[in-house]
Amino acid sequence: MPNVSSPSLVEPLGALRLESGATLEVEAAYEVYGRLSPAGDNAVLLCHALTGSARAAGDQGWWDPLIGPGAAFDTNRYAVICSNILGSCYGTTGPRSVDPATGRSHAGRFPAVTVGDMVTVQHALLERLGVRSLACVAGGSLGGLQVLEWAARYPTMARSIMPVATNLAHAAWTIAFNECARQAIRNDPAFFEGDYIHRGAIPHRGLALARMVAMISYRSARSFGERFGRQVTPPGEEDAGRFEVESYLHYQGDKLVERFDANAYLRITEAMDAYDVGGGRNGAQAALAPFRGPALVMGIDSDILYPVWQQQEIVEVLKANGNAVEYREIHSEHGHDAFLMEWSQLDAAIRAFTANLP
Amino acid sequence: MPNVSSPSLVEPLGALRLESGATLEVEAAYEVYGRLSPAGDNAVLLCHALTGSARAAGDQGWWDPLIGPGAAFDTNRYAVICSNILGSCYGTTGPRSVDPATGRSHAGRFPAVTVGDMVTVQHALLERLGVRSLACVAGGSLGGLQVLEWAARYPTMARSIMPVATNLAHAAWTIAFNECARQAIRNDPAFFEGDYIHRGAIPHRGLALARMVAMISYRSARSFGERFGRQVTPPGEEDAGRFEVESYLHYQGDKLVERFDANAYLRITEAMDAYDVGGGRNGAQAALAPFRGPALVMGIDSDILYPVWQQQEIVEVLKANGNAVEYREIHSEHGHDAFLMEWSQLDAAIRAFTANLP
């Protein structure tokens, strides 16, 4: 395993059986920061969010300020690993990948995946890499769902967990936002029921609108108010006469289209909504009971998508199970996205936690 | 003027000059509950919200429990009047109306309208009906914007005001929700840039999605959670396997398509976003200074679209102007829509206010 792998490496993992029963040829893209110990027991797994990638550190890395020599995730101490999730479009098998059975992209025929499947792929990858034990599994949003699934599925391999701005299962309001985003994609005539790649089309407007809707949920009324207020784009500029918040949403929408796949957006949000750590396991407390390690749970006071009472539910379940749990609330006006923005608070909380890890 | 006019009556108002400079032949649909005094001074004007109509009382009346003999808006005492707003599709001139110049629906060529234009139309209608003075102008959401515009524009004709779940001007986050809804409509290929009526098309999917997005903003995470949780529609039923909250959103979307016009949705939300009571008037305090009457301002503690701090801004402006202002906060888990649901709290607050009106 390399000391630093950037850009992402890709590891073929062979055929994996999904929770749906389908079988899928899978490869996983990943990055590593730091060096794995000979015993394979100093790895930290970082789990990314909906449109994230294996690029956790380095240029445009989603948690870059927290990773490095001497950083909160100290690469002098840990081999920090992040892999692109199953169903995504950044190197790990997803709807854009070529189906060996047909020689063409899976596209709309890509099977339903689950958060459990994502974790299965991560586990298979880590085995290939020689990782025997994880000092910590950490991540925010969808990444946090994966963290909880790790604790439920591999309760001894994950020695500690750090679920951030996430919940035990999506609430109805969060599902509602995702369904509006999905419907925006489905409504686009260029979507062709998922077959757009083979039609030479891109559901640009649909995916952009999906992102616009999501952006509302990722920020807060206050952050939009302070940043944009009722400012109107001045004459002479593109979007002249439009409210700046409108231009911002359209810009964010268009930007996502350049870097993300509509089928991946559907599959991943469906997996998020369907996930329930306690589902089929007699509830969250029973599901997490085999996990005995410490946990750092973090919430963001302005998060409307994963409100802090949902992180409190995680804390209560872990406390009831006797885990050593610490809860840290990030104070921010930025809403859900604060888990990718409030570096000093994240840094302090994570340092305090990792300093005490065995 | 009739004692009770239901279904709506329609009054032609001739050519009106809009704030944009355009001229428009306008007629207004309205309903009246109660009898206007010979002096024409016992009228109450109710202003409806985005997809509302002149049907305030009676079957499906949007404030029906508050209107009637002995009710909070006591029709033994007041002539309660509600008219459909300009740009809508319930009888008052809007995009679906026939343009006398072409003999066809205005459709996408319907001019931009403002909240000020809506109030101009209401004022012209009331003059025709012989109303000389209004005991109160009341309404929620967009209705509340009209209420504030009444106070600014006709500060002596409106003897008291009751703005509910509204604000002095839309905040960026509220504009963001509206822009996503508008984009959903524009994205629909059946929209034909507003010309759908003449193409024999209906932007069904776009307008339905607009409503789905709006429904998120009208309710709250808690109300969705308590009503739907993670319930899945059972096998055998339509939408089987889907989360009930998803089915609910689609149902609400489809229902709006049956009763509302996409161009009207665009024109009215644009008017809402553009409205600023203090715009061009040296700010809200100066704009409302000529209005000397009492005010009942109401907010809803779970409203995320017009959060209560925005009603506090209205209260502060009126207090600074020396008005007698009462603020009542409705406690509800239903979010913004509580102004159409929490009858007992609305009833008590409105009764207390109207009892003291001169």
Image (cartoon, coloured by chain):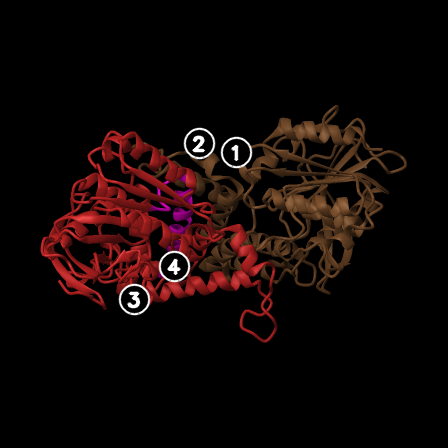
Chain colours: A brown, B red
- Find the magenta span and give its range: B164-190
What's the magenta bit mostly, secondary-structure-wise?
helix
Q: Nearer the viewer, mark 1 or mark 3?
A: 3
Observer-nearest of A191 and A158 = A158
> Which residue is denoted by mark 2 in the rendering?
A226
Who comes first in sequence, dot 1 or dot 2? Answer: 2
Residue A31 vertical placement versus B349 (above, below): above
Residue beneath the point at 48% across and 48% down: A213
What chain does mark 3 sit on?
B
How far apart, in angstroms, are the residues tagged by discs 3 and 2? Answer: 43 Å
The amino acid sitting under disc 3 is Gly
How far apart, in angstroms, are the residues tagged by discs 2 and 4? Answer: 30 Å
The amino acid sitting under disc 1 is Glu
A210 part of magenta stretch: no
The amino acid sitting under disc 4 is Leu
Determine the residue located farthest toward the bottom in the rendered image.
B236
Question: Residue B229: percent from the left, percent from the top?
Answer: 59, 58
**Same chain, marks 4 and 3?**
yes
Observer-nearest of B186 and A335 = A335
Do the CB atoms of the residues marked 1 and 2 lie less than 8 Å apart?
A: yes
Question: Residue A138: percent from the left, percent from the top?
Answer: 72, 40
Neighbour class for label 1 at 10 Å: few (<14), some, many (≥20)? many
Neighbour class for label 4 at 10 Å: few (<14), some, many (≥20)? many
Q: Secondary structure at mark 4?
A: helix
**Same chain, marks 2 and 4?**
no
